[in-house]
Image: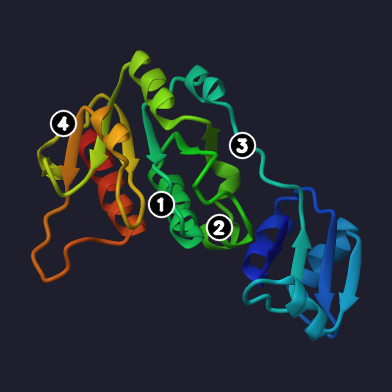
């Protein structure tokens, strides 16, 4: 997987993660990164700005790292660690939303993120850059069927809280003191009907202006920290 940008490169190089190779723009002059590269004795290739722009799908700042693909966890592995708060993503499409949610989950102490393998954005360079180095601290599970994952969570004592505007209650009226699985729906269509049917509670964030919905990562942040607040 190719990741690019100086901030994410620094995080990866500082953590001494496996790096297949580093591609630098000719004349690259970031002293901190150059020092980390020298200490780690990494394989380095130099390319022209034009060649690097062909490889990077975004702002690269003169550096690209080729690293192994992200390794997802198994649901059994997460459940064996006795989690009490997990977040499920119901077919998100925007890598920036996924990256931001990962960062929020890590900051809030969420135990794991569970998401489907199909019709869901996966961990890529944009997600890694947006999550700003927090991926290593989050267990992310990729499952074939989200409803089956919900069933497994319920068998392990979880209450499942979905998010939607219809047939819902104010998110502040729900008791989050038990084991909680919070579902964040797709950016455009929200939760699928089947996932919604399998939720124990449906929460809504009240809208007081002309906007009738929030960005998925913003809504996730509000909900996640309400769960954390309610447990204090």
Q: Mark 4, residues whose alpha carbon is within 10 Å: few (<14), some, or many (≥20)?
A: few
| Residue density around tag 3, few if under 14, some if 14–19, many if 20 or more, within 10 Å | few
Quarter containing the N terminus: bottom right
Disc 4/disc 3 C-alpha distance (Å) = 30 Å
Q: CA distance from mark 1 to mark 2?
A: 13 Å
Image height of 179 relative to 164, above or below: above
Any mark on residue 127, and which? 2
CA separation in Å, label 3 and label 2: 14 Å
- Return the residue at label 1: 104
Residue highlighted by disc 4: 175
Front residue of 115 and 231:
115
Task: Give the mark nearest the N terminus, 4 or 3.
Answer: 3
Q: Which mark is residue 72?
A: 3
- Proximity of marks 3 and 2: CB atoms separated by less than 8 Å: no
Identity of the residue drawn at 54% across and 35% down: 142
Instruction: Categorize mark 1 by other alpha carbons within 10 Å: few (<14), some (14-19), many (20+).
Output: many
Mark 4 or mark 3, which is nearer to you?
Answer: 3
Q: Is residue 91 left or right of residue 225?
A: right
User: What is the CA distance from the residue labelled 1 to the residue labelled 3?
Assistant: 18 Å
Left or right side of 111 for 1: right
Spatial CA distance of label 4 from label 1 is: 21 Å
Q: Position of residue 6 (x, y in %)?
A: 67, 71
- For the rendered model, the colour scheme is rainbow
Q: Which structural element holds mark 2? A: helix
Residue 154 higher or lower than 133, as above or below: above
- The answer for how far apart the CA atoms under marks 4 and 2 are is 32 Å
The tag earlier along the polypeptide, 4 or 1, is: 1
Q: Residue at x 76, y 48 (%)?
A: 68
> Element type at marker 4?
loop
Q: Nearer the viewer, residue 60 or 36?
A: 60
Instruction: Choose top left, top right, bottom left or bottom right for residue 28.
Output: bottom right
């Amino acid at each position: 997987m190719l990741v690019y940008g100086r901030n994410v490169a620094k995080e990866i190089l500082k953590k001494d993660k496996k790096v297949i190779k580093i591609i630098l723009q000719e004349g690259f002059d970031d002293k901190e990164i150059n020092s980390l590269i020298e200490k780690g004795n990494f394989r380095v290739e130099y390319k022209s700005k034009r060649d690097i722009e062909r490889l990077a799908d975004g702002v690269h700042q003169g550096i690209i790292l080729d690293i192994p693909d992200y390794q997802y966890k198994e649901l059994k592995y997460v459940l064996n660690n006795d989690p009490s708060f997990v977040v499920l993503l119901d077919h998100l499409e925007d890598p920036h939303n996924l990256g931001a949610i990962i960062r929020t989950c890590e900051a809030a102490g969420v135990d794991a993120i569970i998401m489907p393998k199909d019709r869901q954005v996966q961990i890529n360079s944009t997600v890694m850059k947006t999550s700003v180095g927090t991926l290593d601290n989050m267990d992310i599970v990729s499952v074939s069927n989200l409803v089956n994952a919900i069933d497994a969570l319920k068998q392990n004592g979880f209450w499942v809280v979905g998010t939607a505007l219809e047939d819902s209650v104010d998110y502040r009226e729900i008791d989050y003191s038990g084991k909680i699985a919070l579902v964040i729906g797709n950016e455009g269509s929200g939760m699928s009907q089947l996932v919604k049917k399998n939720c124990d509670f449906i929460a809504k964030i009240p809208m007081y202006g002309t906007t009738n919905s929030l960005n998925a990562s913003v809504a996730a942040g509000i909900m996640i920290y309400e769960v954390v607040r309610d447990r204090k």
